[in-house]
Image: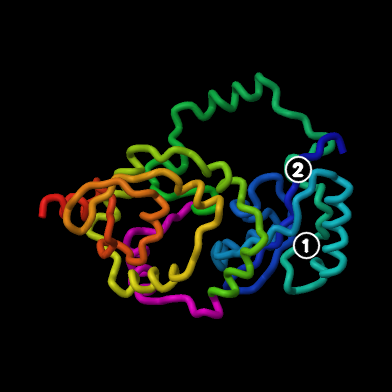
Amino acid sequence: MKNFYPTYLYIKTHNITGLKYFGKTTNDPHRYYGSGKHWIAHLKKHGYNITTEVFGYFECPEDCKNAATQFSINNKIVESKQWANIIAENGLDGGNTGRKNYKPHTQEARDKMSASTKGQLAWNKGIKGSTIGNFSPRSEETKEKLRQANLGKTASQETREKMSKARKGKERPEAVLWLTGRPVSNVTRAKMSKSNKGKYVSEETKEKLRQANLGKTCSEETKKKLSGSVVVVDKDGNCCKISKEDYHSQPNTGNERDYVFHNSKEGSRRKQA
């Protein structure tokens, strides 16, 4: 092999049918659907409701090959009907891994392809929400039906524990890490502000938050982050400064707190009262 790129081995599970697929990718495994012929046909028929489990991340081709081959043998992914794999996975074949007899396009060929597509509209032009693998995004009517069907539904404690257990110890996807720390644009801020207008936290939720935080103490690292002071308004409408630690350790939540930020809605109301 001429080139080997850092590779993920993953396990895909269809949440409706239970069919599994074992594969590899050099991209984000959580955004990649898989490339097996039987697996792709299964997704087209039953939908893309799948769960992805990262089996391992490899920077050494021998380690990747050994892990993939051993997993394929141990789980009999070709013989078993529980798996969609047609051939055993070795962690090397397919994808951008230095294929034999592969020659890149010449500049002349690339220019011809570019000229032949000039003036043509993109396949997803004017289609909102369309992505690769999702050529038919849900209509607003379908979204509303799904929203109505799920109103009031909450996950059971058992389901929550399973979800928590499944996520423990997993690394965050590269796409999420890439977005971490990126500034939010003014357009996005406006959308977020508009979507939250008129929404208020219920008294029941406030009480749950209060009970959840009772008795909790801040770590030394958190205390350092909270060091400093903030401008607040008390219940009498007076502006003053208190430490961040005192502000965040208030027993009550929301507008019931003794001190609120001076530039918040509740702060403005108290100053005008």
- Residue drawn at (64%, 73%) of the image: 18
| Picture quarter with the C terminus | bottom left
Q: How many marks?
A: 2
Identify the mark nearer the N-term, 1 or 2. Answer: 2
Magenta highlight range = 135-159
Given the image, on which type of amino acid does mark 1 rest?
Ile
| Mark 2: few/some/many CA within 10 Å (<14, 14-19, 20+) | some
Q: Is residue 87 left or right of residue 49?
A: right
Given the image, on which type of amino acid does mark 2 rest?
Pro
| Picture quarter with the N terminus | top right
Residue 76 picture quarter: bottom right
Label 1 element class: loop
- Residue drawn at (33%, 49%) of the image: 242
The question of residue 246 being in magenta is answered with no
Which label is found at residue 209? none
Which label is found at residue 86? 1
